[in-house]
Image (cartoon, helix red, strand yellow):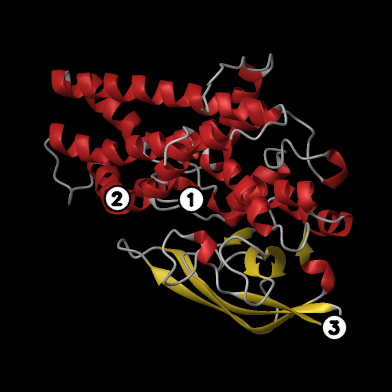
Amino acid sequence: MQTFTFKPFDMPANAAALREQVRAFIRDNMTDGDIARRANCWQVNDPDFSRALGKAGLIGLSLPRQYGGHDRSALERYIVLEELLSVGAPVGAHWIADRQTAPLLLRYGTEEQRRRWIPGIAAGEVYGCIGLSEPNAGSDLASVRSSARRDGDGWVLNGQKIWTTNAHIAHIMIGLFRSEEGSERNARLSQFLIPLDTPGITIRPIINLTGEHDFNEVFFDDVKLPADALIGEEGQGWAQATAELSLERSGPERYLSSMVLVTELVRHAAKSGDPAAIALAGRFTSEAWTLRQMSLAVAGRMAMGEDPALEATIVKDLGNSFEQAVPQLVQQVIELDLSSDDPLALLAAQLLQVSPSFSLRGGTREILRGIVARGLGLR
Protein backbone atom coordinates (compact mmCIF):
# COMPACT_ATOMS: atom_id res chain seq x y z
CA MET A 1 0.00 0.00 0.00
CA GLN A 2 1.20 3.50 -0.85
CA THR A 3 2.19 5.72 2.06
CA PHE A 4 2.22 9.50 2.07
CA THR A 5 5.00 11.52 3.65
CA PHE A 6 5.29 15.27 4.09
CA LYS A 7 8.85 15.69 5.33
CA PRO A 8 9.59 19.33 6.25
CA PHE A 9 12.29 21.14 4.31
CA ASP A 10 14.37 24.00 5.67
CA MET A 11 14.16 27.32 3.89
CA PRO A 12 17.35 28.51 2.14
CA ALA A 13 19.74 30.74 4.06
CA ASN A 14 18.86 33.76 1.93
CA ALA A 15 15.11 33.44 2.56
CA ALA A 16 14.78 36.65 4.59
CA ALA A 17 16.71 38.74 2.06
CA LEU A 18 14.71 37.31 -0.82
CA ARG A 19 11.43 38.05 0.94
CA GLU A 20 12.50 41.65 1.47
CA GLN A 21 13.46 41.93 -2.20
CA VAL A 22 9.98 40.77 -3.25
CA ARG A 23 8.26 43.03 -0.72
CA ALA A 24 10.25 46.02 -1.98
CA PHE A 25 9.21 45.17 -5.53
CA ILE A 26 5.57 45.00 -4.45
CA ARG A 27 5.80 48.36 -2.71
CA ASP A 28 7.24 49.94 -5.85
CA ASN A 29 5.05 48.26 -8.46
CA MET A 30 1.67 47.39 -6.96
CA THR A 31 -1.06 49.92 -6.30
CA ASP A 32 -4.13 49.34 -4.15
CA GLY A 33 -6.48 49.55 -7.13
CA ASP A 34 -9.63 47.44 -7.03
CA ILE A 35 -9.26 45.45 -3.83
CA ALA A 36 -11.56 42.68 -5.11
CA ARG A 37 -8.97 41.91 -7.81
CA ARG A 38 -6.54 40.88 -5.08
CA ALA A 39 -8.64 37.77 -4.42
CA ASN A 40 -7.78 34.76 -6.58
CA CYS A 41 -4.99 36.93 -7.95
CA TRP A 42 -3.10 34.25 -9.85
CA GLN A 43 -5.85 34.48 -12.44
CA VAL A 44 -5.71 38.29 -12.64
CA ASN A 45 -3.77 39.48 -15.68
CA ASP A 46 -1.50 42.53 -15.71
CA PRO A 47 1.14 42.17 -18.46
CA ASP A 48 2.93 45.32 -17.30
CA PHE A 49 3.32 43.86 -13.81
CA SER A 50 4.54 40.55 -15.27
CA ARG A 51 7.14 42.28 -17.46
CA ALA A 52 8.37 44.32 -14.48
CA LEU A 53 8.58 41.14 -12.40
CA GLY A 54 10.59 39.46 -15.15
CA LYS A 55 12.93 42.45 -15.43
CA ALA A 56 13.52 42.21 -11.67
CA GLY A 57 14.57 38.56 -12.07
CA LEU A 58 11.57 37.21 -10.16
CA ILE A 59 10.15 34.97 -12.90
CA GLY A 60 11.90 31.83 -14.07
CA LEU A 61 13.86 31.57 -10.85
CA SER A 62 14.52 27.84 -11.12
CA LEU A 63 15.07 27.83 -14.89
CA PRO A 64 18.63 27.46 -16.27
CA ARG A 65 20.56 30.64 -17.05
CA GLN A 66 21.23 29.42 -20.58
CA TYR A 67 17.52 29.88 -21.29
CA GLY A 68 17.11 33.21 -19.52
CA GLY A 69 16.40 31.80 -16.06
CA HIS A 70 18.25 32.33 -12.82
CA ASP A 71 19.41 28.86 -11.67
CA ARG A 72 17.87 29.28 -8.22
CA SER A 73 16.25 26.60 -6.12
CA ALA A 74 12.62 25.50 -6.19
CA LEU A 75 12.26 26.67 -2.58
CA GLU A 76 13.51 30.14 -3.49
CA ARG A 77 10.88 30.22 -6.21
CA TYR A 78 8.32 29.13 -3.61
CA ILE A 79 9.23 32.09 -1.39
CA VAL A 80 8.63 34.51 -4.26
CA LEU A 81 5.28 32.92 -5.08
CA GLU A 82 3.92 33.01 -1.55
CA GLU A 83 5.00 36.63 -1.08
CA LEU A 84 3.21 37.65 -4.28
CA LEU A 85 0.08 35.60 -3.63
CA SER A 86 -0.28 36.59 0.01
CA VAL A 87 -0.79 40.25 -0.98
CA GLY A 88 -2.88 39.52 -4.06
CA ALA A 89 -0.37 40.59 -6.73
CA PRO A 90 -1.75 40.35 -10.32
CA VAL A 91 0.46 37.49 -11.56
CA GLY A 92 -2.00 35.70 -13.85
CA ALA A 93 -0.48 36.69 -17.21
CA HIS A 94 2.77 34.77 -16.80
CA TRP A 95 1.59 32.22 -14.23
CA ILE A 96 0.93 29.13 -16.36
CA ALA A 97 3.97 29.63 -18.57
CA ASP A 98 6.30 29.92 -15.58
CA ARG A 99 4.65 27.15 -13.59
CA GLN A 100 4.09 24.54 -16.30
CA THR A 101 5.06 25.46 -19.84
CA ALA A 102 8.74 26.16 -19.25
CA PRO A 103 9.36 23.14 -16.94
CA LEU A 104 7.57 20.88 -19.44
CA LEU A 105 9.76 22.11 -22.30
CA LEU A 106 12.86 21.62 -20.15
CA ARG A 107 11.88 18.03 -19.46
CA TYR A 108 10.42 16.94 -22.80
CA GLY A 109 11.01 19.69 -25.35
CA THR A 110 13.64 19.99 -28.06
CA GLU A 111 16.56 22.36 -27.78
CA GLU A 112 15.00 24.54 -30.44
CA GLN A 113 11.70 24.71 -28.51
CA ARG A 114 13.54 25.67 -25.33
CA ARG A 115 15.60 28.42 -26.95
CA ARG A 116 12.61 29.77 -28.87
CA TRP A 117 10.19 30.12 -25.95
CA ILE A 118 11.75 29.87 -22.47
CA PRO A 119 13.70 33.18 -22.48
CA GLY A 120 10.47 35.09 -23.19
CA ILE A 121 8.71 33.20 -20.42
CA ALA A 122 11.45 34.11 -17.93
CA ALA A 123 11.18 37.75 -19.05
CA GLY A 124 7.44 37.83 -18.32
CA GLU A 125 6.70 38.49 -21.98
CA VAL A 126 5.54 35.08 -23.30
CA TYR A 127 2.35 33.58 -21.86
CA GLY A 128 1.04 30.06 -22.09
CA CYS A 129 -2.16 28.08 -21.65
CA ILE A 130 -2.97 24.40 -21.24
CA GLY A 131 -5.29 22.57 -23.66
CA LEU A 132 -6.65 19.59 -21.73
CA SER A 133 -10.40 19.74 -20.99
CA GLU A 134 -12.93 19.12 -23.75
CA PRO A 135 -16.72 19.41 -24.12
CA ASN A 136 -18.75 16.38 -22.99
CA ALA A 137 -15.72 14.97 -21.18
CA GLY A 138 -16.16 16.50 -17.75
CA SER A 139 -13.05 15.71 -15.73
CA ASP A 140 -12.40 12.52 -17.66
CA LEU A 141 -9.23 13.64 -19.37
CA ALA A 142 -8.69 10.21 -20.94
CA SER A 143 -11.75 10.74 -23.15
CA VAL A 144 -9.93 13.34 -25.28
CA ARG A 145 -11.30 13.33 -28.82
CA SER A 146 -9.40 16.22 -30.42
CA SER A 147 -7.19 14.68 -33.06
CA ALA A 148 -3.72 15.10 -34.49
CA ARG A 149 -3.07 13.30 -37.77
CA ARG A 150 0.09 13.02 -39.76
CA ASP A 151 0.28 15.16 -42.89
CA GLY A 152 3.56 14.60 -44.69
CA ASP A 153 6.27 15.81 -42.33
CA GLY A 154 3.82 17.74 -40.18
CA TRP A 155 0.55 17.46 -38.27
CA VAL A 156 -3.05 18.60 -38.70
CA LEU A 157 -5.09 19.31 -35.56
CA ASN A 158 -8.88 19.27 -35.27
CA GLY A 159 -11.15 19.51 -32.25
CA GLN A 160 -12.08 21.75 -29.35
CA LYS A 161 -10.71 22.59 -25.92
CA ILE A 162 -12.76 24.27 -23.20
CA TRP A 163 -12.20 26.05 -19.87
CA THR A 164 -8.83 27.09 -21.26
CA THR A 165 -7.51 29.69 -18.85
CA ASN A 166 -5.93 32.75 -20.48
CA ALA A 167 -6.03 31.44 -24.05
CA HIS A 168 -7.10 34.95 -25.07
CA ILE A 169 -3.77 36.46 -23.97
CA ALA A 170 -1.50 33.43 -24.42
CA HIS A 171 1.12 33.12 -27.12
CA ILE A 172 1.37 29.33 -26.98
CA MET A 173 -0.67 26.33 -25.84
CA ILE A 174 0.53 22.94 -24.68
CA GLY A 175 -2.30 20.79 -26.05
CA LEU A 176 -3.15 17.11 -25.58
CA PHE A 177 -4.46 15.41 -28.74
CA ARG A 178 -5.24 11.88 -29.89
CA SER A 179 -2.49 11.07 -32.35
CA GLU A 180 -3.69 7.65 -33.49
CA GLU A 181 -7.15 7.24 -34.99
CA GLY A 182 -9.24 4.62 -33.18
CA SER A 183 -7.16 4.62 -30.02
CA GLU A 184 -9.02 4.76 -26.72
CA ARG A 185 -8.65 6.25 -23.28
CA ASN A 186 -5.09 7.23 -22.34
CA ALA A 187 -3.39 5.30 -25.16
CA ARG A 188 -1.73 7.12 -28.09
CA LEU A 189 -2.19 10.65 -26.85
CA SER A 190 0.47 13.22 -27.71
CA GLN A 191 1.33 16.74 -26.61
CA PHE A 192 1.93 19.61 -29.00
CA LEU A 193 3.37 23.10 -28.69
CA ILE A 194 0.91 25.31 -30.56
CA PRO A 195 1.49 28.99 -31.38
CA LEU A 196 -1.98 30.49 -30.97
CA ASP A 197 -1.64 32.79 -33.97
CA THR A 198 -1.59 29.73 -36.25
CA PRO A 199 -4.32 29.85 -38.93
CA GLY A 200 -7.38 27.72 -38.14
CA ILE A 201 -7.46 28.51 -34.41
CA THR A 202 -10.50 30.36 -33.03
CA ILE A 203 -10.68 31.53 -29.40
CA ARG A 204 -14.03 32.44 -27.87
CA PRO A 205 -14.51 33.90 -24.37
CA ILE A 206 -16.40 32.30 -21.48
CA ILE A 207 -17.48 35.07 -19.10
CA ASN A 208 -17.88 34.09 -15.45
CA LEU A 209 -20.44 35.10 -12.83
CA THR A 210 -18.58 38.29 -11.91
CA GLY A 211 -18.27 39.40 -15.53
CA GLU A 212 -14.59 38.47 -15.71
CA HIS A 213 -12.89 36.79 -18.65
CA ASP A 214 -10.50 34.03 -17.55
CA PHE A 215 -11.82 31.00 -19.40
CA ASN A 216 -12.10 30.34 -23.12
CA GLU A 217 -13.08 27.69 -25.60
CA VAL A 218 -10.56 27.06 -28.38
CA PHE A 219 -11.43 25.55 -31.75
CA PHE A 220 -8.97 23.82 -34.09
CA ASP A 221 -10.02 23.56 -37.74
CA ASP A 222 -7.38 21.86 -39.89
CA VAL A 223 -4.58 23.58 -37.98
CA LYS A 224 -1.28 22.74 -39.64
CA LEU A 225 1.82 22.36 -37.50
CA PRO A 226 5.39 21.36 -38.38
CA ALA A 227 6.83 18.05 -37.23
CA ASP A 228 8.80 19.74 -34.44
CA ALA A 229 5.59 20.92 -32.77
CA LEU A 230 5.43 17.49 -31.09
CA ILE A 231 6.60 17.61 -27.48
CA GLY A 232 8.42 14.56 -26.18
CA GLU A 233 7.53 11.19 -27.63
CA GLU A 234 4.56 10.51 -29.86
CA GLY A 235 1.93 8.54 -27.95
CA GLN A 236 3.37 9.42 -24.53
CA GLY A 237 1.21 12.48 -23.94
CA TRP A 238 -0.75 10.92 -21.09
CA ALA A 239 2.34 10.25 -18.96
CA GLN A 240 3.75 13.70 -19.78
CA ALA A 241 0.49 15.52 -18.99
CA THR A 242 -0.08 13.73 -15.69
CA ALA A 243 3.50 14.44 -14.58
CA GLU A 244 2.87 18.09 -15.46
CA LEU A 245 -0.16 18.16 -13.18
CA SER A 246 2.09 17.71 -10.13
CA LEU A 247 3.45 21.18 -10.93
CA GLU A 248 -0.10 22.52 -11.05
CA ARG A 249 -1.62 20.86 -8.01
CA SER A 250 0.77 21.43 -5.14
CA GLY A 251 1.83 25.07 -5.28
CA PRO A 252 0.93 27.82 -2.82
CA GLU A 253 -1.86 29.00 -5.12
CA ARG A 254 -3.82 25.96 -3.95
CA TYR A 255 -4.38 27.44 -0.51
CA LEU A 256 -3.63 31.16 -0.92
CA SER A 257 -6.40 32.16 -3.34
CA SER A 258 -8.45 33.44 -0.40
CA MET A 259 -5.54 34.58 1.78
CA VAL A 260 -6.16 38.31 1.26
CA LEU A 261 -9.55 37.78 2.89
CA VAL A 262 -7.90 36.02 5.85
CA THR A 263 -5.51 38.97 6.21
CA GLU A 264 -8.40 41.42 6.14
CA LEU A 265 -10.22 39.30 8.73
CA VAL A 266 -7.17 39.50 11.03
CA ARG A 267 -7.24 43.31 10.70
CA HIS A 268 -10.96 43.35 11.44
CA ALA A 269 -10.54 41.07 14.46
CA ALA A 270 -7.74 43.20 15.89
CA LYS A 271 -9.71 46.41 15.41
CA SER A 272 -13.10 45.16 16.62
CA GLY A 273 -11.99 42.81 19.38
CA ASP A 274 -14.86 40.51 18.38
CA PRO A 275 -14.16 37.12 20.05
CA ALA A 276 -15.81 35.19 17.20
CA ALA A 277 -13.71 37.00 14.59
CA ILE A 278 -10.55 36.44 16.65
CA ALA A 279 -11.30 32.72 16.96
CA LEU A 280 -11.96 32.39 13.22
CA ALA A 281 -8.77 34.26 12.36
CA GLY A 282 -6.82 31.89 14.60
CA ARG A 283 -8.42 28.86 12.97
CA PHE A 284 -7.60 30.10 9.47
CA THR A 285 -4.02 30.92 10.45
CA SER A 286 -3.34 27.47 11.87
CA GLU A 287 -4.93 25.68 8.91
CA ALA A 288 -3.02 27.81 6.40
CA TRP A 289 0.25 27.09 8.22
CA THR A 290 -0.38 23.34 8.07
CA LEU A 291 -1.19 23.50 4.36
CA ARG A 292 1.94 25.57 3.77
CA GLN A 293 4.11 22.93 5.42
CA MET A 294 2.55 20.21 3.28
CA SER A 295 2.92 22.24 0.11
CA LEU A 296 6.55 23.04 0.95
CA ALA A 297 7.24 19.35 1.49
CA VAL A 298 5.99 18.58 -2.01
CA ALA A 299 8.06 21.44 -3.45
CA GLY A 300 11.13 20.10 -1.66
CA ARG A 301 10.67 16.61 -3.06
CA MET A 302 10.17 17.97 -6.55
CA ALA A 303 13.37 19.98 -6.13
CA MET A 304 15.13 16.68 -5.41
CA GLY A 305 13.91 15.28 -8.73
CA GLU A 306 11.08 13.19 -7.30
CA ASP A 307 7.50 13.12 -8.59
CA PRO A 308 5.23 13.22 -5.51
CA ALA A 309 2.06 13.18 -7.61
CA LEU A 310 -0.14 11.64 -4.91
CA GLU A 311 1.05 14.04 -2.23
CA ALA A 312 0.44 16.95 -4.61
CA THR A 313 -3.09 15.66 -5.15
CA ILE A 314 -3.73 15.66 -1.39
CA VAL A 315 -2.43 19.22 -1.07
CA LYS A 316 -4.74 20.42 -3.82
CA ASP A 317 -7.81 18.73 -2.33
CA LEU A 318 -7.20 20.03 1.19
CA GLY A 319 -6.11 23.44 -0.07
CA ASN A 320 -9.23 23.85 -2.20
CA SER A 321 -11.43 22.90 0.74
CA PHE A 322 -9.72 25.54 2.86
CA GLU A 323 -9.89 28.40 0.38
CA GLN A 324 -13.53 27.64 -0.43
CA ALA A 325 -14.46 27.55 3.26
CA VAL A 326 -12.85 30.91 4.06
CA PRO A 327 -15.45 33.24 2.47
CA GLN A 328 -18.35 31.07 3.64
CA LEU A 329 -17.22 31.07 7.27
CA VAL A 330 -16.43 34.78 7.21
CA GLN A 331 -19.97 35.46 6.01
CA GLN A 332 -21.39 33.24 8.75
CA VAL A 333 -19.37 34.78 11.59
CA ILE A 334 -19.16 38.46 10.59
CA GLU A 335 -22.21 40.59 9.88
CA LEU A 336 -21.39 42.05 6.48
CA ASP A 337 -23.16 44.24 3.97
CA LEU A 338 -21.87 42.60 0.80
CA SER A 339 -22.97 45.59 -1.26
CA SER A 340 -20.83 48.02 0.73
CA ASP A 341 -17.33 49.26 -0.05
CA ASP A 342 -15.87 47.84 3.15
CA PRO A 343 -12.69 45.88 2.20
CA LEU A 344 -13.76 42.79 4.13
CA ALA A 345 -17.17 42.82 2.42
CA LEU A 346 -15.70 43.44 -1.05
CA LEU A 347 -13.29 40.53 -0.75
CA ALA A 348 -15.92 38.21 0.74
CA ALA A 349 -18.41 39.07 -2.00
CA GLN A 350 -15.86 38.40 -4.74
CA LEU A 351 -14.73 35.08 -3.28
CA LEU A 352 -18.24 33.84 -2.56
CA GLN A 353 -18.89 34.12 -6.29
CA VAL A 354 -15.65 32.69 -7.68
CA SER A 355 -14.57 30.15 -5.05
CA PRO A 356 -16.89 27.33 -6.26
CA SER A 357 -14.55 27.02 -9.25
CA PHE A 358 -11.49 26.44 -7.06
CA SER A 359 -12.19 22.71 -6.73
CA LEU A 360 -12.71 22.35 -10.49
CA ARG A 361 -9.50 23.78 -11.91
CA GLY A 362 -6.65 21.29 -11.98
CA GLY A 363 -9.00 18.34 -11.43
CA THR A 364 -12.27 18.04 -9.57
CA ARG A 365 -12.45 16.90 -5.96
CA GLU A 366 -14.00 13.57 -7.03
CA ILE A 367 -11.19 12.86 -9.49
CA LEU A 368 -8.54 13.78 -6.94
CA ARG A 369 -9.99 11.53 -4.27
CA GLY A 370 -10.14 8.67 -6.76
CA ILE A 371 -6.42 9.15 -7.40
CA VAL A 372 -5.70 9.10 -3.68
CA ALA A 373 -7.85 5.99 -3.19
CA ARG A 374 -5.95 4.14 -5.90
CA GLY A 375 -2.69 5.23 -4.30
CA LEU A 376 -3.86 3.67 -1.04
CA GLY A 377 -4.58 0.42 -2.84
CA LEU A 378 -8.36 0.86 -2.64
CA ARG A 379 -10.69 0.00 -5.51
**Residue receiving disc 2:** 350
Judged left or right of residue 9, residue 314 is left
Judged left or right of residue 186, residue 60 is right
**Residue receiving disc 1:** 362
Judged left or right of residue 316, residue 321 is left
Amino acid residing under circle 2: Gln
The residue drawn where x is 18% and y is 48% is 340
Residue 320 percent coordinates (x, y)? 38, 40
| SS at badge 3 | loop
Residue closest to the eye, 201 or 314: 314
Dot 2, how many residues are within 10 Å of its Cα: few (below 14), some (14-19), or many (20+)? Answer: many
The residue drawn where x is 83% and y is 67% is 228
Residue 347 percent coordinates (x, y)? 30, 44
* Pointer 1 or 3: first along the chain: 3
Judged left or right of residue 140, residue 195 is right
Above or below, comparing residue 194 to residue 245 in the picture: below
